[in-house]
Image (cartoon, grey):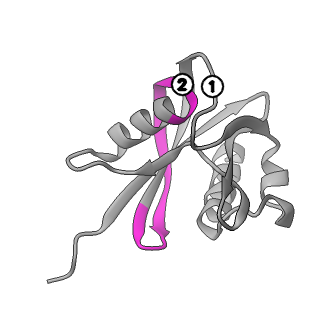
Amino acid sequence: MAPPIERASVAVLLDRGRVLVQIRNKDKGIRVGLPGGRADPGENAVQTMCRELYEEAGLVADEWAPFFAGPDGNKLTTAFLVTRWHGQLRNSTEGVMAWADPEVLLGEMARFRDWNIRMMRALRSTLSG
């Protein structure tokens, strides 16, 4: 029997054409990511996204819709476009929150992981369609 598939979720917030990212200082250098992470036992994708958004950015999602899901290394990750939220944006021990131009995130300098690049392309298609 195959081991259960790990699940994760990310929140994608847009404000004036910019996306909320987290700048993380990891072992392999600076990494740019989105608020999100692995599901806790018993959590569904929405619960994971909401918890991670609050833990990492201090924000509470009010309205969202899934727009992309796919394999991300050893887990299945779902991306949610969060269209309304409230709370006070803050940094966490995970990293510094910042608003960034989505096109810059697709460039080599951002060092966005492959899954994030596929997800950002899906976001572009969702927003233009």
* Direction left: furthest residue: 1
Badge 2 amino acid: Gly
Percent position of residue 70, x then y? 47, 65
Would you say the residues marked 1 and 2 are in contact, meaning their CB atoms lie under 8 Å apart? yes
Q: Residue at x 44, y 58 (%)?
A: 77
Would residue 10 be seen by someone viewing this image from the given angle? no
Q: Local crowd at mark 2 within 10 Å, few (<14), some, or many (≥20)? A: some
Q: Secondary structure at mark 1?
A: loop
Q: Compared to 63, does 108 lie above or below?
A: below
Viewer-nearest residue: 101 or 27? 27
Q: Name the residue at the top extreme.
A: 87
The residue indicated by pointer 2 is: 58
Residue 27 horizontal/vertical position (percent):
65, 64
Left or right of residue 46: residue 106: right
- On screen, residue 75 above or below 100: below
Between 84 and 107, the residue placed more toward the observer is 107
Residue count near mark 1 (Cα–Cα under 10 Å), binned few <14, some 14–19, many ≥20? some
Which label sits on residue 90?
1
Q: Quadrant of residue 119?
A: bottom right
Residue 89 belongs to magenta span: no
Q: CA distance from mark 1 to mark 2?
A: 6 Å
Pick whichever of labels 1 and 2 is earlier in the sequence: 2
Report x, y in % for residue 69.
Answer: 46, 59
- Kind of element beneath mark 2: loop
For badge 1, the amino acid type reads Arg
**Which image quarter: residue 75?**
bottom left
Q: Is residue 73 visible?
A: yes
Image coordinates for residue 16, horizontal then vertical, percent: 79, 27
The magenta region covers 56-76
In the rendered image, residue 63 lying in the magenta stretch gets the answer yes
